Image: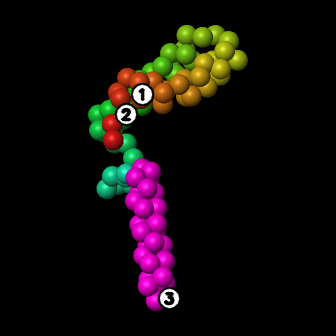
Amino acid sequence: MLHRATAGRARRAARRARRRSLVRGLRPRFGRDGRIYHRSLRERIGIVVVTVLAVAAVWTLIPDLALRIILTAILVLAVPALVVVVLGRRS
């Protein structure tokens, strides 16, 4: 009876350890500052400057207000995807 209880505890402990290792492998790894992906200061400044210039170009060159708003929304939604495509996704 004692051997059966000890074996049950060992199986539960092994199952718990496997589950912990699987969950640990699925969780994203964060850097020291809590972010998953890191961009240098120069890259972040470049992203902001290019986005602001694109929005400024839309608002100065397009006369129709509705089209300006639509293009600005498209820019805001498309910039993160473009940044990942152009600069890559480093971990």
Residue at 68% in and 12% down: 64
Q: Which of marks 1 and 2 is in front?
A: 2
At 59% across and 22% down in the image, what residue appears? 74
Would residue 47 be visible to someone looking at this image? Answer: yes
Range drawn in magenta: 1-28
Tell me the number on the disc at residue 36: none
Residue 76: image x %, image y %?
55, 28
Disc 1 target residue:
83
State the predominant SS element of the stretch in magenta: helix
Q: What element carries label 2?
A: loop
Q: In this view of the protein, which residue sits in the foreground, 67 or 34?
A: 34
User: What residue is shown with label 3?
Assistant: 1
**Quadrant location of residue 23?**
bottom left
Please say which color scheme the image uses.
rainbow
Task: Estimate the spatial distance between the alpha carbons at disc 2 and disc 3, rounded to whole Å.
Answer: 55 Å
Q: How crowded is mark 2: few (under 14 residues within 10 Å), some or many (20 or more)?
A: few
Q: What residue type is labelled 1?
A: Val
Between 9 and 37, the residue placed more toward the observer is 9
Of residues 45 and 87, the one nearer the viewer is 87
Q: Mark 2 = which residue?
A: 89
In the rendered structure, which amino acid carries the disc numbered 2?
A: Arg
Secondary structure, mark 1, is helix
